[in-house]
Amino acid sequence: MKKKIALVQMRSSQNKQENLLKSIDAISEAAAGAAELVCFPEFQMAFSPASQRAKELASIAEPIDGEFVTALLRAAKKNRIGVVAAIYEKGGSSKVYDTALVLSPAGTVSSVYRKLHLYDALGFKESAKLARGKKIQGPVRTKAGNVGLLICYDLRFPELSRILTLKGANVLVAPSAWVQGEMKEEHWLTMVRARAIENGSYLVAPDQVGNIYCGRSMVVDPFGVVLADMGQREGIEIVDIDSKRTLEVRKSLPLLKNRRDDVYTLST
């Protein structure tokens, strides 16, 4: 069955309210295009420059029931659309969680995932500001499919997307803020397609653009066909996905079935 998913590529500013208003407009636009689910990038709430201290970032973070998510929930309910959002969530210290949420068309929070793998690599140290999540959040049923969440740097760790797939995900959504740099864009294109192909799953990867980020938000189908690549354009793109395509690919290329779980195991 075909469904429509909206992909949002945005340039978040440091102004949380400005980003919220932009997000609400995108939700309305996605709903007007008959999308069942609209997916935002990592750091949707605000851009955090390298000069910003952990305490400064913590001062703009909110709990799940804070004003930012509450406003998105109202917009989801008003427009009768599911939303994948990303926030800085208040933690138990001066550090905050990098959190992705699935919001239902009824205006409720369906899933909460806190980023497991922090980007302490290639000259960055996210752990200076962010707290590590402690568990995998299983897939959640949406009108667009069974959605499994991962965030940005998580794409480099294939175990996570495989576990989500084994738990029943057929749509992997990876809100991202992929930093520019040597070979970084090539890595992005490779990782997004690889995670889709190896799991026979749609991969929806909304990315930040501008500031220090590379853009190229993408949707890839279960066989690795790129259905959307937004380049450097800020805005939304609506893509058709089809659960029958997932079943057909997994039947003709039965990677999940052909796994040697008699020889190796992966905890789920």
Image (cartoon, grey):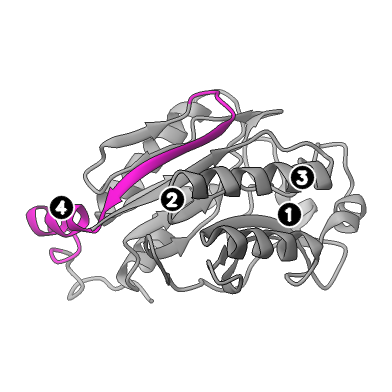
Q: Earlier in the sequence, mark 4 or mark 3?
A: 3
The kind of residue on which mark 3 rests is Ala
Q: CA distance from mark 3 to mark 1?
A: 17 Å
Crowd tier of the residue under label 3, counting other residues whose Cα lies within 10 Å: few below 14, some 14–19, many 20 or above: many
Return the residue at label 2: 35
User: In the rendered image of this protein, does residue 43 appear above or below residue 77?
Assistant: above
Tell me the quarter of the picture where residue 265 sits.
Answer: bottom left
Cα distance between the residues tagged 2 and 4? 23 Å
Looking at the rendered structure, the kind of residue marked 2 is Ala
* Magenta extent: 231-258
Above or below, comparing residue 9 to residue 119 in the picture: above
Q: Residues within 10 Å of mark 1 (few under 14, many from 20)?
A: some
Whole-percent x, y for residue 209 in the image: 62, 30
The amino acid at mark 4 is Val
Of labels 3 and 1, earlier in sequence is 3
Residue assigned mark 1: 127
* Residue at the spot 81% in from the left edge and 47% down from the top edge: 16
Residue flagged by tag 1: what amino acid is it? Answer: Ser
Q: Residue 115 placed where, x, y %?
A: 61, 60
Pointer 3 residue:
46
Q: Are marks 2 and 1 in contact (CB under 8 Å)?
A: no
Q: Nearer the viewer, mark 2 or mark 4?
A: 2
Judge the density around disc 2: few (<14), some (14-19), many (≥20) Cα neighbours within 10 Å: many
Circle nearer the viewer, 3 or 2: 2
Q: Quadrant of the N terminus?
A: bottom left
Residue at x 10%, y 59% (from the top left corner): 251
Residue designated by label 4: 249
Q: Are marks 4 and 1 in contact (CB under 8 Å)?
A: no
Residue 201 located within the stretch drawn in magenta? no
Q: Nearer the viewer, mark 2 or mark 1?
A: 2
User: Could you tell me how far apart the alpha carbons at marks 3 and 2 are, in whole angstroms?
Assistant: 25 Å
